[in-house]
Every structure is written in structure tokens, then in C-alpha cells.
Amino acid sequence: MELKEFVVNVGPHGTFRPSGKYQTTTQDIDEIFQKFRADKPEKITIFFHGGLVNEEAGIETALKMATHFKNDNHAPLCFVWETGFSETLKANISKIASTEIFNKLVKVLVKKLSEKLGFDFADGRGAGQSLPDAVIENELNKEVPFENFDQDFLDKNNRGPAAITALPDNEHRYELELQAEFRQLIEPDYEFMQAIEKHKFTGQDQTEENIGGRGIISSALFIKSVAQIAFKVIKRFITKRDHGFYPTIIEEILRKLYIAEVGAWVWNEMKVKSQDMWGDNALRSNLNMFAGTYVLEKLIAHKKQFPEVQINLVGHSAGSIAICNLLQATVERDSNFTYNKIAFMAPACRVDLFVEKLIANSSKFKEFKMYTMADAFEKKDRMVPYFYTHSLLYLISGILENEGKDYDSYILGMERYLLSEKPYHEAVELKAVIAYLSNIENSVVYSKSDVGSAIGLQTESLSHGGFDDDPATIKSVLHFLK
């Protein structure tokens, strides 16, 4: 198959405008549907890859998926809607991790927070004592630092935040106390102080308080920021909305001091693009038309001509966001149009989006199934070893949503939010999702599936990006689409 027979390349702002080496035009879409009319496939499966890949990777994925979906009565249609964000993100955070100021900051936060949260070793010291420098150094040299420092550790040892057992009435006063404690740790370190005075930060608050508009902050403001980071970590542990000791510290450092390098705005732009591509084409023409809408209108017309054709939707990672928006756009254009089956692989969509646009429109498709990782494996999917040691979904949940303003956001593909356990058991949107999934037999298949699992209920991917390459998952999706 040639690319033009099954690829829809979405350009800037969801239009047909070119953005790379490969371009789709309205004529290409016309020819795809001309072929559909001639071949009369019984099924058309539309695939959306994850939204954090470049054009080359998107096309490579489209080629693989088209091969899986293509047979005598089954035709593929693959959207390529690249952002090229993933590799940039990994490079940027690896660069941050290599700086002296970052490493010093991590050490002082680990030292103080190990004391506040009760993470001590059973070697004669009681709870409420910070870890020795040698222990901290040893842990930071591991591929997975502080791997077992989590809520389970605290529960098993009957420990918890030693400084406060509930959120303080006066958070400002508590932050001032933390500032004084961090000042004692930071100010005696001459090299640390010198690095602070020279380093440019891009955190949430720096544009309001920077010095000379250059992003370089005073040591006083830096210590204030460190105290705020520490308090946020403590607060997340108290409310049980942390992502583990070390990953939570990293998330809060990035949010406070390095948000631009992390690229939360890029993640937001990708989400905007996933919605923009279904915009109104009434006053647009040629390359300025929204690519998704142009395809959707052709799809609606094709199904009116061939009402027996089954239209399936398959999305990996952020592809689930595009599908939620597509479903809503379809309902708005033709309330009688129905899809056949929808399959998500490691979906990165927010739970509230899923409730609003998929569950609310569940009468517009016949079946739903999701393949994703069990939480134990999600935590072992090392996005950046030594630095951020959980999966991309954890990073999205921890820092990327709402341009860095949200934390522990409810992401559909993460098992932790679907277990009806505290503190998530009372969240209205989670209750709605759990109720919906509970009414569907085998609605969620978790990797790694048990040996001997039934056909269609097998998935073995142990990485977020690996689901569309995992033979077991692909075999299961194809069985589901039968």
C-alpha cells in the first residue's frame, strides 16, 4: 500500500497545511473514499497514534498498523498528527538532571523530606530523622533511586509525615518554617549559593518575581521556592496523591522551577490540535480546511451510501484524546451515525474528557475495550532512568496537564484511578468511569496478562510506547474488531 491510500497527515492547527516532508491534500482524501466505494470493504478501522511523536515515527506506526488492519474485507485509515515532543522532553529533562544546581537541590530536598515524611532506615535511627549524606548519594546513583520509598513503606512501618499529620491551618506559617530549615541547609554551601545567583529558571512563578526580567532569581526567592516544593510534596503524601517519594520530588521541582523545559505547553498544544482538527469548514477551502472534519464528512457520506459498513476506532496513548473529540464531533454533525467498536491502548486522555465525550455518547458505538498496564508495571516503565523513573502516563498525570497547574490528574490508562480506593473513591468522574466499565464484560485488559488468558484478552507490553508493537496486544485488538 502507498501512503496516500490510507494516511491522513494533519498539519498545523489541525488543517491540511504542510508541516513536514509528507503532506495530505483534500484530493488525497477524495481518492481514498473513491477506493472505498469501489472496493466496498465491510470494515474501516481508523487509527490514531500517540500525539508525542514526529512525522517520521507517526508514518512508521501508520504503516505497521495498516498492515495489521488490511485484509480482503477490512480497510485501514491512519491519522498522523505529529508534535515531535517526546524526544525533546527526554532530552530536556536529561539536561536538567545533569546540572550541579539541580543535583544539589535534589539532595537537600531528599534530606529534609526523608525526615518530614518518616523515610528512615532500620539501623538504629527512629522515625523523623533525615537520611545520611552517604545513603542519599548511594540511592541517587541507582537507576531507580529510592525505589521502595512510597505509601506502602510508610504503612508497613506505621509511619507517616512526622512534622504534620494533617494539613496545617496556616500553610503560610508552615512554609516560613520550612524556609528557615532549608536556609540552614543551603546558605552554608558557597558553591550552591553561587550557582543559584547565576542560574535561569522557568518555573510557574518566576515571571512575576524574577530579577531584571532575565529569569535569574535571588537566593532568598530560591529558598522560598524550595520550601514551597517541599510543602507540596508533604501535602501530596498526606492526601495520598503522591507518585512515590522520588518521582513526586522530581515532579514538584520541574513544576516550580523548570516548567518551560518540561514542555507542558506543548502537551496542551497537542490536545488543542486533537480538537481543532474537527473544526467547522464552512468558511474554509483547500489547505486551510480542517483535515479531521473533511475526513469525517466523507465518512458520514460513505456510511449513508453503504449503511452496513462497520467503522472502528483505535487509539494509542494521546490517540484516545483525538477519538473522544472525534466522537463528539460526529454526534454534532450526524446524530444518527454510529461506530462499531472502539479500542484504546494505554490511553492518555483525562477521565473527565472520557466521561464527557465517550460515555455521554456511548449509544453511538457498539463496544469498547481498553488495553493498558497494571500500576505495578506503570511504575517500572522508566521514562528517564536515574531521573524520572515512572511511565509517561505518570508524568502526564503529575505535571503536564493544564500546562503544569494540575497534579495527580486522573488519566484513563492508569489503573490506580480505577480501583475505587482512597483517596479516589469519592471522585464523581471516577465513579462514572468505573460504573461504565463495570457494565462491560472484560472492558479493561491489563498488561501483563496471565498465561493462558483467552484470545482477545492478552497484552504483554511493559512500556507505554510498546502497545502498538506488542504482538499479543495487536492480536487481541484484531480479535476484538472481528
Image: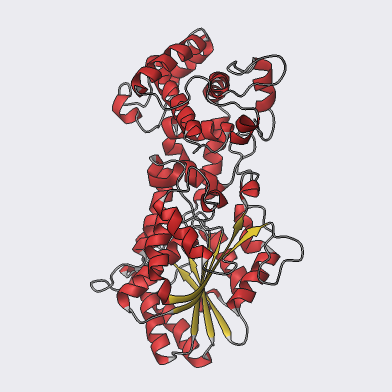
Please give left or right for residue 479 compared with residue 211 in the image.
right
In the rendered structure, the answer to whether residue 127 lies left or right of residue 24 reads right
Which residue sits furthest right? 451
User: In this rendering, does residue 291 appear at all?
Assistant: no
Percent x, y of residue 475: 67, 71
Which residue occupies the extreme top position in the image? 188
In depth, the one of 253 and 58 nearer the eye is: 253
Q: Where residue 168 sits in the image (x, y, percent)?
A: 39, 24
Q: In which quarter of the image is residue 388?
A: top right
Q: In this view, does 53 lie to the left or right of 210?
A: right
Name the residue located 33 percent from the left edge and 78 percent from the top edge: 335
Q: Position of residue 380 (x, y in %)?
A: 65, 44
Question: What residue do we see at 45% from left, 54% from top?
Answer: 430
Residue name at image x 46 percent, y 49 percent: 410
Q: In this view, does 455 lie above or below 468?
A: below
Assign the C terminus to one quadrant of the image: bottom right
Observer able to see residue 142: yes
Q: Quadrant of residue 137?
A: top right
x and y, in percent, of residue 255 in the image? 44, 35
Q: Which residue is drawn at the image coordinates 58% and 46% (left, top)?
A: 391
On-image quarter of the N terminus: bottom right
